[in-house]
Image (spheres, rainbow, N blue to C red):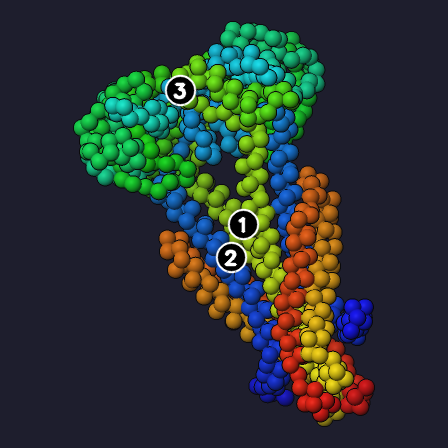
């Protein structure tokens, strides 16, 4: 039989039992839709997280105290005898390729103004921090380019903090008390929104040296370095490490580029996406059983037809191929239907939750469709062999 | 028709098409088994974490420095506060009623060395009460001696890993170890422990709090841990401690008090949601099984038109025909649920054999939910085929058209 005839024959037998074929396809489609939806959710989440982490720019390298390079935080950030000092930070500034640098100290303190007070986050930073983190101003100006070690007491207020202390009044030039120390407001930052669900506008940005005094610390928690776009992160990591090694005489610090961090985050999320995709795949298995059931019913019902075909000289290989083709088409069409349902679901989710990017994974779509076809084929093998093995005389006599 | 007769009728119909019935039951069983297996995994993970937590004791209050308006900051960050938790706070908390132990805790990284061997260790500064609040077990030697909070003594208790790496097979007891720029005499070795929630106690060096503060030149405490004599008094002690600390901190609440229970219930909630959603994903296959039941029942109705026509011609009301076919799909669902529970239990048993340390139990609700979903799928998806059977015109059905 020619391919064209073959496909016409199988399509016709599928169409003859329209309702049955549709329901069988639906069973497969639900499984495929689950896989498409779940992997889409996984990669949407991945994009969302990476977006959150890269909102400060991608050409960043973080230097932290302590050589513990496992996931999570080094205990050295809390306290260590070998701190990263402001002088260490300053020494990184003139390394070739370094565009800007800022030390980071984070803490909580009470901000007071004219009888109002509020517990808020405080970040001790250097004057280049706006450049490193891509900060934007709502009014006023950034911190002056003071000496890192001996800065003037000035503060930039986050949007939420400025609102709660000053309401609609102009905060510029006013003196705010932070942790008992007096700071002059030089700027208010443009709202940046949330980072992983926390309001990062509820914060005060003060010079790092003063934050060390306020929190009674020797060392900074982190030094963030922005490097030029034409430099590679690996060579920058090497240069920064060499400089700090010269100063400390030992590798008692960790240098981590944004690339490395994103790569390890991506790996974790990939595994997660695969895992929930596989969970959705259980439903595919069930759908496969559905095809198997339906095909074996079809073989039983069409014994007369099969007998006639064989009696007319069709070799059993052809009969096998006919029924296998039917099962495969059921699987493939079911898969397509599932992909459409899954994509629609994802898109609706994206409309409902705009923060979640619409991110279907092309590779998973292809895998899902191939899987549907494969499941159809595998589920079809046994019924098709039953059909091919039918004795034409027996089959025709039953008619 | 009596109910047993109806059941017998449905049973005969199912066994007549044995292959088909077995396949449908298998499809439903896959879904039920998946739900049972995955909830067992989720529950196991929850119990495991809870077990780790409860090692710390559930009568524990923890004081952290700093407080935010909305409580906390971005996850994964450590925050300083302008007013520290101090030894004065610790001493004051010890005078509260119903408090059995109060441990100050400071934490930092330090180089520990013996001769030429050196490695980085986690330094914990505390006092004798830490053994009680953190439920620490000493393998050899003894724990820190009871000292006044502000008096120093150059002794240390080492974690087993650190002790092994610094001393090899020699006994470290009574030997000197260099921590930072000072020397300490080893008086005890902790028992080997698993990683307890990221805090690896195998790699610590514990020294008296006064020594730690001198080493880091920092009077601030990382945590204060309060053990309460009875669980029922947690709330009243928490309030008393809050009042006391506010008084000591010039009327400001610049600290956060958390109970072990609060941390636990957060984890509990997270794992509950996780288990539910995983079970939900597994339940998608029950939906698929439902579709298959419907499909097969539709086929069966169209194949048995003659039989249905005969039944009706003999005076069976449509309601009875409806019931007969519904009963058949319900039976399919029920058998699927039973087979699935068996299959799931088998899977759980196999997993338990493979990972003996991991607690695996399927909660009762998972069995019930899976079984009822399977039955529900049978009923819901059986409705349409059953109704079609009930609406057949006996004359047309019998004439084979």
Q: Is residue A81 above or below residue A398?
A: above
Q: Is residue A234 visible?
A: yes
Q: Which residue occupies 21% across, 31% down?
A: B172
Tag 1–tag 3 contact (CB < 8 Å): no
Percent position of residue A60, x then y? 59, 24
Quadrant holding the C terminus of chain A: bottom right
State whether residue A60 is above or below residue A327: above
The percent position of residue A285, horizontal first and vertical second, equals: 60, 63
Kindly report which numbered mark, 1 or 2, lies closer to the viewer in this rendering.
2
Say whether residue B148 is visible: no
Nearer to the camera, A398 or B296: A398
| Residues beneath discs 3 and 2 located on the same chain | no
| The one of B198 and B319 positioned closer to us in this rendering | B198
Residue with the mark numbered 3: A250
Up-down relation of residue A172 to residue B306 (above or below):
above
Identify the residue position indicated by label 1 in the image: B274
Q: How much space separates mark 1 and mark 2, taking CA atoms?
A: 10 Å
> How far from the left and from the top, in percent, is residue A365?
68, 52
Chain letter for mark 2, please: B
The residue at the point 56 percent across, 20 percent down is A225
- The residue at which mark 2 appears reads as B38
Q: Nearer the viewer, mark 1 or mark 3?
A: 3
| Residue appearing at x 55%, y 68% in the figure | B29
How many tags in the picture? 3
Q: CA distance from mark 1 to mark 3?
A: 44 Å
Label 3 lies in what chain?
A
Give the Cα separation between the discs numbered 3 and 2: 48 Å
x%, y% of residue B292?
Answer: 66, 70
Q: Please give the name of the residue rendered at 49% of the width and 67% of the height, measured from the top-left corner.
A: B343
- For discs 3 and 2, the disc positioned in front in the rendered view: 3
């Amino acid at each position: 039989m020619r391919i064209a005839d073959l496909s016409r024959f199988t399509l016709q037998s599928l169409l003859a039992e329209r309702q049955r074929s549709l329901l069988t396809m639906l069973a497969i489609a639900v499984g495929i839709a689950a896989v498409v939806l779940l992997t889409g959710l996984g990669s949407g989440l991945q994009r969302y997280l990476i977006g959150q982490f890269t909102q400060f720019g991608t050409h960043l390298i973080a230097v932290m105290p302590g050589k513990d390079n496992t996931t999570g935080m080094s205990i050295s950030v809390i306290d260590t005898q070998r701190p990263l000092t402001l002088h260490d930070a300053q020494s990184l500034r003139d390394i070739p390729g370094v565009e800007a640098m800022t030390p980071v100290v984070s803490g909580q303190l009470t901000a007071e103004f004219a009888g109002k007070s509020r517990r808020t986050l405080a970040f001790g930073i250097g004057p280049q921090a706006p450049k490193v983190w891509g900060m934007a101003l709502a009014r006023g100006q950034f911190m002056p380019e003071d000496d890192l070690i001996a800065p003037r007491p000035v503060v930039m207020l986050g949007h939420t903090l400025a609102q709660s202390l000053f309401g609609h009044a102009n905060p510029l030039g006013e003196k705010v008390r932070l942790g008992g120390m007096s700071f002059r407001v030089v700027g208010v930052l443009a709202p940046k929104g949330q980072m992983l669900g926390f309001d990062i506008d509820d914060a005060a940005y003060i010079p790092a040296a003063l934050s060390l005094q306020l929190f009674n610390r020797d060392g900074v928690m982190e030094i963030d370095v922005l490097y030029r776009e034409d430099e590679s992160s690996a060579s920058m990591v090497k240069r920064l490490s060499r400089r700090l090694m010269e100063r400390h005489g030992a590798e008692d610090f960790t240098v981590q580029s944004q690339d490395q961090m994103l790569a390890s985050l991506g790996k974790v999320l990939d595994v997660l996406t695969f895992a929930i995709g596989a969970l959705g795949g259980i439903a595919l298995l069930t759908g496969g059983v559905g095809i198997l059931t339906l095909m074996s019913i079809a073989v039983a019902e069409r014994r007369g037809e099969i007998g006639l075909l064989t009696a007319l000289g069709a070799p059993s290989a052809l009969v096998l191929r006919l029924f296998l083709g039917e099962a495969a088409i059921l699987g493939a069409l079911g898969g397509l239907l599932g992909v459409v349902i899954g994509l629609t679901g994802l898109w609706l989710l994206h409309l409902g939750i705009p923060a979640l990017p619409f991110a279907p994974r092309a590779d998973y779509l292809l895998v899902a469709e191939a899987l549907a076809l494969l499941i159809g084929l595998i589920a079809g093998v046994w019924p098709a062999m039953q059909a091919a093995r039918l004795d034409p005389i027996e089959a025709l006599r039953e008619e | 028709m009596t109910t047993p007769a109806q059941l017998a009728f449905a049973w005969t119909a199912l066994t007549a098409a044995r292959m088909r019935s077995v396949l449908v039951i298998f499809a439903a069983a896959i879904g039920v088994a998946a739900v049972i297996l995955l909830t067992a995994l989720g529950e196991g993970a929850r119990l495991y974490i809870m077990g780790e937590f409860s090692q710390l004791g559930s009568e524990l209050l923890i004081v952290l420095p700093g407080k935010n308006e909305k409580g906390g900051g971005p996850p994964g960050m450590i925050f300083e506060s302008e007013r520290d938790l101090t030894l004065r706070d610790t001493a004051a908390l010890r005078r509260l009623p119903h408090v059995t132990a109060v441990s100050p805790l400071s934490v930092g990284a330090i180089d520990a060395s013996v001769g030429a061997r050196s490695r980085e260790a986690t330094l914990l500064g505390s006092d004798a009460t830490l053994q009680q609040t953190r439920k620490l077990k000493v393998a050899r030697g003894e724990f820190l001696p009871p000292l006044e909070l502000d008096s120093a003594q150059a002794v240390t208790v080492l974690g087993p890993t650190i002790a092994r790496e610094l001393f090899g097979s020699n006994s470290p007891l009574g030997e000197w170890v260099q921590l930072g720029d000072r020397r300490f005499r080893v008086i005890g070795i902790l028992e080997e422990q698993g990683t307890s929630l990221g805090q690896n106690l195998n790699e610590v060096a514990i020294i008296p709090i006064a020594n730690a503060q001198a080493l880091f030149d920092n009077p601030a405490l990382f945590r204060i841990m309060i053990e309460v004599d009875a669980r029922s008094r947690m709330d009243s002690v928490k309030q008393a401690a809050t009042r006391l600390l506010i008084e000591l901190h010039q009327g400001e609440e610049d600290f956060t008090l958390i109970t072990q229970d609060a941390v636990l219930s957060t984890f509990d909630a997270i794992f509950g949601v996780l288990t539910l959603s995983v079970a939900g994903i597994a339940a998608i296959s029950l939906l698929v099984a439902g579709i298959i039941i419907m499909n097969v029942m539709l086929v069966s109705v169209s194949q048995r038109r003659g039989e249905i026509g005969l039944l009706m011609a003999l005076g069976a009301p449509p309601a009875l025909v409806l019931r007969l076919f519904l009963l058949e799909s319900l039976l399919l669902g029920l058998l699927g649920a039973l087979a699935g529970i068996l299959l799931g239990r088998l899977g759980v048993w196999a997993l338990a054999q493979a990972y003996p340390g991991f607690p695996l139990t399927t909660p009762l609700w998972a069995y019930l939910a899976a079984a009822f979903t399977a039955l529900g799928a049978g009923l819901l998806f059986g409705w349409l085929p059953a109704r079609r059977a009930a609406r057949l015109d006996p004359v047309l059905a019998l004439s084979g058209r």
